[in-house]
Image (spheres, grey):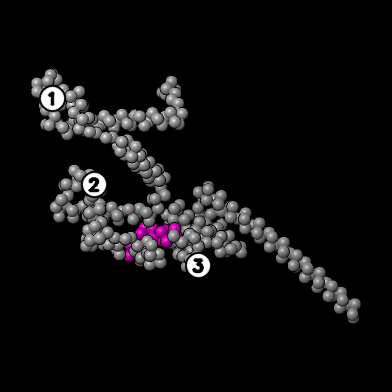
Amino acid sequence: MNYFRLSINFLLTVILAAVLMTGCNQGKQASVDADKLREYAGDLINKALYRQAIQEYQKYLDQYNIDTRERANVNYIIANTYFERLKDYENALTYYLKIKHLFAENTLMPEVNKKIVACLERLERTEDAQQVLDEAVQLDPSRIQKKRPGEVVARIGTREITQGDLDFELNQLPPSLREQLNDRNKKMEFLREYVATELLYDTAKRSGFEKDPEVIEGAFQAKKALMVRKLLQDRVAGKVDITDSDIELYYQAHKDDFATKDKDGKVIEQKPLSEVRQQVTQALTQQKYQEAYISLIEKMIRAEDVTFYESRVK
């Protein structure tokens, strides 16, 4: 009897060890399978098999024990696939909301909130979109825009536009255009256009156009042009210094340029400096600016060892 019991105990021990070994092996295999499944789902995305990819990603979430950060990232991939590839905004919203409620501490949340608003707007649920925006501002007070002083002249949701904001925008216009907006009705028209632009800009941002390649390139080119203009103001325009003596000398050397001429170009009347002083000053300023500009560029070409291959230009 004791021998029989020992045999049974030994057999149970062997079976238990086998079960434990199998479990360990299955655990290792599961990890390998999870990596392969995620890689497979990514390959389906690359091959534009979006719905099939979503199915595999969902299997990955359902069948494998993955950490919270990875789970949030995969849900975000699924949400973006619905949003950007399939234009299925209801399903995209479902997954974005899942991230918001189950993985609220994730670093993806700022982007998730933007996409939730974009989904709601595409589903024509503007009031819900505004509520999400208001909630985001309450959670992050730094997003509240500081207003310029003055009476409130318009309101976009909870955002106030003041007379100071309006005056600031008007002052950005060229003087000639600003002069055309000097009465109340014209300013009201400008305010409506300003609000319309803000609404369109906000919607474009929430729609993800700030990441559009053309927008990114256009913003870069605009920034480059602005930086060049600022540099020229500092290094060229800022160096142009004109005295009364310079104006007098330039006028004497170019009198005919400011004279009254007949149809054949023959001078029929010389104009005194007092009459054409403004035109003379402008012409002299332009000349000095051009000279300073050429001097600056030539210095840069020498400093940077620039070489031109004219024969290769076709």
Closer to the chain start, of discs 3 and 2, is 3
- Circle 1 sits in a helix, a strand or a loop, which is it? loop
Which residue in the protein does label 2 denote? 173
Judge the density around disc 2: few (<14), some (14-19), many (≥20) Cα neighbours within 10 Å.
Answer: few
The region drawn magenta spans: 111-128
* Most common secondary structure along the magenta stretch: helix
Number of disc labels: 3
> What residue sits 23% from the left and 55% below the top?
166
- Compared with 122, 249 (above or below) is above
Q: Residue 225 location in percent, x, y?
A: 35, 40
Mark nearer the viewer, 1 or 3: 1
| Residue 102 marker | 3
Nearest to the eye among marks 3 and 2: give it: 2
**Contact, CB < 8 Å: mark 1 with mark 2?**
no
* Residue at mark 1 to residue at mark 2: CA–CA distance: 34 Å
- Establish if 215 lies above or below 70: above
Measuring from the top left, give residue 30's x and y in whole percent: 66, 60
Q: Amino acid at mark 1?
A: Ala
Q: Which amino acid type corresponds to the residue marked 3 in the rendered image? A: Leu
Q: Quadrant of residue 176?
A: top left
* Membership of 120 in magenta stretch: yes
Instruction: Identify which residue is drawn at 22% across, 30% down.
Output: 246
Mark 1–mark 3 CB contact (< 8 Å):
no
Residue annotated with mark 1: 259
